[in-house]
Image (spheres, coloured by chain):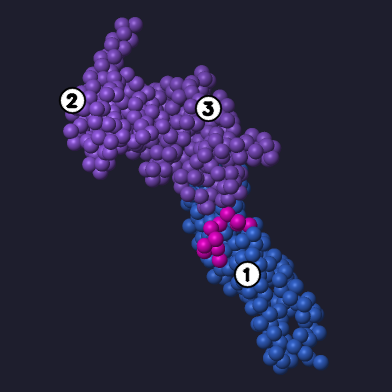
Chain colours: A purple, B blue
Amino acid sequence: MIRIDSVTKRYPDGTVAVDRLSLEIPDRAITVLVGPSGCGKTTTLRMINRMVEPSEGSILLDGTDIRQQPVNTLRRSMGYVIQNAGLFQHRTILDNIATVPRLLGTPKKEARARAAELMERVGLDSALAKRYPYQLSGGQQQRVGVARALAADPPVLLMDEPFSAVDPVVRKGLQDELLRIQDELGKTIVFVTHDIDEAIKLGTMVAVLRTGGRLAQFAPPADLLSAPADAFVEDFLGADRGIRRLSFFPSADLELQTAPIVGVDADADKLAARADAPYLLVTDLDGRPLGWGEPDRLTAGSVEREHLLDFGRPFVPGDDSLRTALDGAVLSPTGWAVAVDGDGRAVGVVSQQVIGEAIRAAHRRVARNTEVNAAR
Amino acid sequence: MNGFFDLPSDLQHSYLGLVGLHLREALIPVLAGLIVSLPVAQLCVRFRWIYPPVLGITTVLYAIPSLAFFVVLIDYFGQSETTVMIPLALYSLVVLVPAIVDGVRSVPPETLAAAEAMGLGAVRRYFQVQLPIAVPAIIAGLRVATVSSISLVSVGMLIGNQGALGNMLYDAQTYHRPALAVNSVLTIAVLGILADAVLVLVRILLTPWMPRKGATR
C-alpha cells in the first residue's frame, strides 16, 4: 500500500502545490487523482516516484519511507505512463518497451522477448516491433507507453493523464484496454486525470483535489456521485450526476416481460392473443429485434419493417447497468427498453416504470447498506 | 611538363599530398571543436544563465581575424600546422555550441520526464536520450563548421606554406601560373562539397528513426 502522509509541496516562490494531503492508496486497485488544473494532482503523482520531493510529510510504500531506497531503484520499480507517451523517438518500439528491463540488467534477447509479449498484451500488432515511434498513431504510441511501463512487471503503475491527448474514440478503447489489463494483472495504479468521467469509469477510488492542492473528497465513484462532500465536488461532477450514478446499479434484477415479443412471421392468432399490449416488439427469424409496432397495425405473416418504431439501444442484463437500460427505454418512442443476450437476440422487454421501480429499490439497498456500515 | 596537377617543388607535396594535408588541417580543428563544444553545450543546457555569455565569447572569438591569432600563436607553436588549426577550432565553436544546445533542447519534455521516471540517471539520460536525439542538429552544425573550416585553411599560407591547397595561390602569383589558383579553388570547393555529402550520409545512417519527409534539410 502507498500511504501519503500529510504531504505538502511548497515551491521557493511560495506557491503551495499540494497542501497537507493524506491518502491511503489501496493495493491492486486503480486510484484516480482528479481535479482542475493547478490542483496539484500531477505534483502528487510525481512525489510518489520522487520526481518531486515533498517539502513536508512523507510517503510510505508498504510501510517504508520511499526515501529509504536509491531514487533510481525506486523509479524502476514503478511503471510510469505520461501524456503523449514520451517514447524515445530514436529507438524501435521493441527497444522502447525493453528500456527498464535493460536498465535492470536483463539480457537484450530476453528483454526483447518480454517486450514482444507485452506488445501482444496491450493489443499491438507484432509487425510494429521494428518500427520507430513516428510511424505510429497517437493511440498506438500510448499503448507502447503502457507496455513500456509494464515491461519490468512493477507492482505500481503511475499514469499521468495518459489518455488526454488522443481523440475520444481512441481514448475509450484505451480505457477499456486498461481495465482489461488491470483485471489480468492487478497492479496498484495511481491515475491522474482532469476528466471526471474518466475518473468515474476507471477508478476503484477517486480523490478529488481542489485548486491549491487540498483534498476535497476521497471515495469510491458511486459514493462520489451519490454524496458529494461539498459544493465544489458537486460542481466538478457536473450535470447528470443521478443518471451517471445509475452506471453502478446492475440491470440483472430487472423483471423482463417476454409476452410483447413476436416473430416477424407471427400469425393472426398470435397477434390477437397479444392485442392488449400497447406495443409489440417484432424480431427477425433469429430472434433479433427489428422494431416496435402497434398490435392492430401489424399484418399477420408479413410485417412491414419500415413501419416499425425505433427500439433504441438494447441492453444486456447482467453486463450492462441500469443506466444503459434506462437509456434504451428513453431512446425508444415507446418508452420500453429491449433486453438482449450476448448474441443480440431479444430476451425480454422492460418499461420505464419498471426501470424506475428498480432504481428506487437500488437506492433503498444502498441506504440500508450505509446504515449497516454506520452501525458497525 | 607543367600539367594541371604538377606542382612547383617549393610546395613540398604532390597534389594528392596537399589534399590530404588540407583535409587534416581542416578536420582536426572541427573534431577538436566538437570535443570542446559537447561539454560546454551541456553546461549551457544545465545552467541556462551561462548560455548567453558563452555565445558572446564564441562570437567574439569568431570576430578575431586569423592573422591576429597567428601573431600570438607563432610565439608558442612557430610557423606550424598547430598555429593554423587553433583558430579554426575556435571558429567552429560559434556554430557547434548553439547547434548542440538547440539539439539537446529539442528533446521533448515528456521524453525527458519519461526517461527520468524510468530510472535513467543524469548521465544515462545524456548519453542514451539527449545526445542521440540531438544528432541531426549536431550534424547540421558540423556541416557548416566543416565546410567553413575547409575553406579557411588556405589562410595558413600567410605564415609560410601552412595553407595546404591555399599555398598554391601564392605560387600562382610567384610563378605566373594562374592554373594553380584555379586548381586550388576548384579542389577546395570539391572537398567542401564531398565532406558535406559524407556528413549527410552519416546523418542518414545514424538516424533511421527520423521521418523520411524533410530528411535532407
Evaluate if marks 3 and 2 touch, with contact meaning CB atoms under 8 Å apart.
no
Q: Image point 56% across, 38% down: which residue?
A: A120
From this viewpoint, which residue is outermost toward the top? A376
**Mark 3, residue position:** A185
The answer to which image quadrant residue B25 occupies is: bottom right
> Amino acid type of disc 1?
Asp
Q: Position of residue B149 (x, y in %)?
A: 63, 71
Foreground: disc 3 or disc 2: 2
> Amino acid type of disc 2?
Asp
The residues tagged by marks 1 and 3 sit, at their Cα atoms, a distance apart of 53 Å
The answer to which image quadrant residue A337 occupies is: top left
**Mark 2, residue position:** A276
Determine if the magenta segment contains residue A101.
no
Q: Image point 71% across, 93% down: which residue?
A: B176
In this view, A6 is above or below A111: above
Q: Position of residue A198 (x, y in %)?
A: 36, 34
**Mark 1, residue position:** B196
Return the chain for callout 1.
Answer: B
Q: Nearer the viewer, residue A334 or A102?
A: A334
Same chain for mark 1 and mark 3? The answer is: no
Bounds of the magenta segment: B206-216
The residues tagged by marks 2 and 1 sit, at their Cα atoms, a distance apart of 89 Å
Q: Quadrant of the C terminus of chain A?
A: top left
> Amino acid type of disc 3?
Leu
SS type, badge 1: helix
Q: Position of residue A48 (x, y in %)?
A: 48, 30
Q: Earlier in the sequence, mark 3 or mark 2?
A: 3
Mark 1, Cα crowd under 10 Å, few <14 / some 14-19 / many 20+, is many
Asked whether residue B209 is in view, the answer is yes
